[in-house]
Image (cartoon, coloured by chain):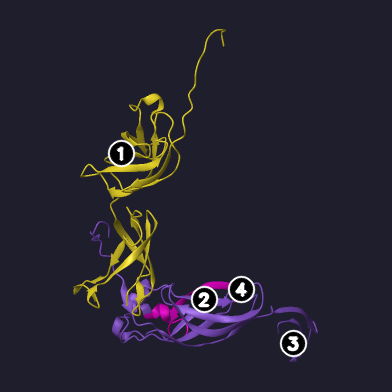
Chain colours: A yellow, B purple
């Protein structure tokens, strides 16, 4: 470096994405949904917040939307109108260049059920059923449910309530539940 | 269901009367042999639909020995043995419906005792038959090694698991 020239490089505390709320929503974001990203060190470098970006997806095929810093631990952004069901990592950048790599996800759901295994189930209930399809997302404990009806009679009753049981999210193509007696 | 809305894909499952597995044709096999096991079964055909069983069942046998579990494929079987294939082609009112489940014992690594269970759908098991795996059958030597064609020569087999 030529003598007499001074260059500076400023380090800032690396931001970290911890929670995305809500962490799922419908495909195509029909109601112009927004999310709030919670984390730490959301501080604009050199006070310039014009480059804050949020990336949905990986580096190569990500969708970038501008983010708004609400405070040091919160960023708000619009959910992009992503057209297929998927679960994408949400990462942020304060300078528009370097993104976090924390792997917190947002799910675009459009659940479609293709198959249930097994098809023959005990009338005693309790059979573990594997539901396969696409567009499933993790919606939180107790939030995903399955309903049992009959072709002939429509909705079934289990006691005084509909035959609805909780389902467990396995991956974006698989749910598990148990049959009711 | 997400956001209080259920899908409308209407995948069908069928409740069945659980078949009753009554008896098994053998309760032990050598660890190095896979042998057929017939399970006498009450299928409750007056309540269960044979065609549905034929299409959607996933019969399996499960052998539990200590903390080891072995699962083998199984199928419904009509008697006389093997007539199931002709039977399936018959009109439903002429069919002889299955009375047994046929599966094979697994080859296992060590002898031991445990239980055998059977499943219609590959998930729910019942039966709880006592089952054991015996030391391997192996023939080391036959004596004598030859004999005349017109005699019933007594032959001695020397080996293990006999």
Badge 3 element? loop
Q: Which residue is mark 4?
A: B107
Q: Residue at x 74, y 79 (%)?
A: B139
CA distance separating discs 4 and 2? 13 Å
CA distance separating discs 3 and 4? 37 Å
B132 and A29: which one is in front? A29
In the picture, measured across the screen, residue B61 lies left or right of residue A94, that is: right
CA distance separating discs 1 and 3? 95 Å
CA distance separating discs 3 and 2? 46 Å
Do the residues at pointers 3 and 2 share their chain? yes
In the rendered structure, find residue A76 and report the number of the disc placed on it: 1
Q: Are marks 1 and 2 in contact (CB under 8 Å)?
A: no
Badge 1 element? strand
Q: Is residue B12 visible from the viewing direction of this image?
A: yes
Q: Which residue is mark 2?
A: B62
Tell me: residue B46, above or below residue B54.
Answer: below
In which quarter of the view is residue B136 placed? bottom right
């Amino acid at each position: 470096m030529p003598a007499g020239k001074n260059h500076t490089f400023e380090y800032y505390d690396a931001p970290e994405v911890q929670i995305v709320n809500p962490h799922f929503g419908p495909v195509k974001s029909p109601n112009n949904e927004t999310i709030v990203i919670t984390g730490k060190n959301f501080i604009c470098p050199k006070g310039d917040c014009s480059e804050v970006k949020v990336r949905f997806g990986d580096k190569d095929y990500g969708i970038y939307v501008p983010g708004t810093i609400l405070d040091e631990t919160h960023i708000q952004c619009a959910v992009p109108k992503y057209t297929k069901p998927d679960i994408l990592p949400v990462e942020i950048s304060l300078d528009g260049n370097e993104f976090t790599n924390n792997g917190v996800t947002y799910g675009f759901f459009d659940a479609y059920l293709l198959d249930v295994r097994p098809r023959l189930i005990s009338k005693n209930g309790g059979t573990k059923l594997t539901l396969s399809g696409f567009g499933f997302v993790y919606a939180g404990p107790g939030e995903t449910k399955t309903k049992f009806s009959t072709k002939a009679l429509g909705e079934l009753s289990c006691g005084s309530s509909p035959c609805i049981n909780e389902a467990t999210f396995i991956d974006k193509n698989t749910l598990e539940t148990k049959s009711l007696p | 269901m997400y956001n209080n809305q259920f899908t409308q894909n209407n995948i069908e499952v069928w409740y069945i009367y659980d078949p009753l597995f009554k008896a098994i044709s053998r309760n032990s096999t050598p660890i190095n042999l896979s042998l057929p096991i017939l399970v006498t079964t009450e299928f409750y055909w007056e309540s269960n639909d044979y065609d549905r069983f034929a299409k959607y069942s996933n019969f399996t046998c499960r052998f539990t020995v200590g903390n080891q579990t072995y699962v083998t494929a199984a199928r419904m079987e009509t008697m006389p043995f093997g007539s199931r294939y002709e039977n399936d082609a018959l009109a439903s009112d002429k069919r002889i419906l299955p009375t047994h489940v046929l599966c094979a014992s697994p080859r296992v690594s060590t002898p031991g005792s445990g239980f055998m269970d059977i499943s219609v759908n590959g998930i729910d098991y019942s039966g709880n038959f006592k089952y054991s795996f015996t030391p391997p059958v192996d023939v080391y030597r036959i004596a004598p090694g030859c004999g005349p064609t017109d005699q019933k020569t007594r032959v001695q087999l020397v080996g293990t698991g006999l």
